[in-house]
Amino acid sequence: MKDQRLREIRVAIKGAGEMASGVAWRLWQARIRKIVLLEIPQPLAVRRKVSFCEAVYDGEMEVEGLKALRVAGMPDIYRTWEAGCIAVAVDPRWELLPALAPQVVIDAILAKRNIGTERSEAPLVLGLGPGFRAGGDCHMVIETNRGHSLGRVILAGGAEANTGIPGEIGGYARERVLRAPVAGVFTSARQIGEGVKAGETVGRVAGREVTAAIAGVIRGLIREGTEVEEGVKLGDIDPRAQAAHCAMISDKALAIAGGVLEAILRVYNK
């Protein structure tokens, strides 16, 4: 396949959260420009500064210099591509796939299970993380678990099982994650990038305080006014206390995105 045709590849990404956005951003930098992210009507993102799903609420979202626009159908998608942006569509049932006719479909929902992706959806279907089987419901799987195999392309079998333990940052894992103590509406006057001390209140759910277990900066926080279930992740604290990192794609997302790019080139760079 010649370079010009490689640049014409259409990529549909299911999900537009942190990892999906990192994938879209890295593919764009590799000059794969016809990208559509498919989202649910009310996406729940913690690292909102680096998640294109924010375009669902605000109409547009920029991550590290790349803008995404919310679209309503194929005419909007074409106009968005011509404007040099990527597209975000509210399409929870992936009904745009037949009209889009993508060469690549990437399930980046990170549901820890397959919620409907099939290998027949495109010539190349990739699954991120556990719940997929390379050679079964998708062609290849990308490892998402931190460690020696992060970002590795799996050609047979699946990714490592979900551990349920957040990745360690600055020596902290579970301690850095903010979770809902009860079900209810999340409220907070705090902003992503703000400093916080251990024991300090970050927000409330149904009147119950959500406090930081460690000191650092608020790296991610869901939207205020969001209805949540007990135990849902509300935000996370970065003990490295570098506010600039809050608007930067993470090392994990870039590693996963590198695996996706490798998988695409394995098939189409011929």
Image (spheres, rainbow, N blue to C red):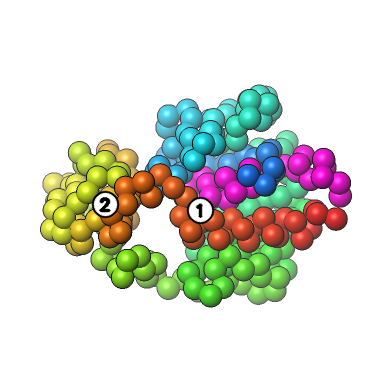
The amino acid on which the numbered mark 1 sits, given as a three-letter code, is Met
Can I make out residue 109 in this image? no
Of the image marks 2 and 1, the number of the one nearer the N terminus: 1
- 178 or 217, nearer to the observer: 217
Can I make out residue 34 in this image? yes
The amino acid on which the numbered mark 2 sits, given as a three-letter code, is Val
**Residue count near mark 2 (Cα–Cα under 10 Å), binned few <14, some 14–19, many ≥20:** many
The label shown at residue 123 is none
Q: Secondary structure at mark 1?
A: helix
Mark 1 highlights which residue?
19
Residue 260 position in % (x across, y down): 64, 57
Asked if 262 appears above or below 206 in the picture, the reply is below
Q: Residue at x 53, y 50 (%)?
A: 22
Residue 196 position in % (x across, y down): 19, 51
Q: Residue at x 63, y 43 (%)?
A: 28
Q: Residue at x 13, y 53 (%)?
A: 200
Asked if 57 appears above or below 50 in the picture, the reply is above
Question: 9 left or right of 177?
Answer: right
Residue 104 drawn in magenta = no
Mark 2 highlights which residue?
217
**Residue count near mark 1 (Cα–Cα under 10 Å), binned few <14, some 14–19, many ≥20:** many
Occupied quadrant, residue 186: top left
Residue 3 drawn in magenta = yes
Task: Give the Cα distance between marks 2 and 1.
Answer: 20 Å
Residue 204 position in % (x across, y down): 18, 47
Residue 54 position in % (x across, y down): 44, 37
Q: Secondary structure at mark 2?
A: strand
Q: Residue at x 69, y 59 (%)?
A: 262
Q: In the rendered structure, which segment of residues is drawn in magenta?
A: 1-28
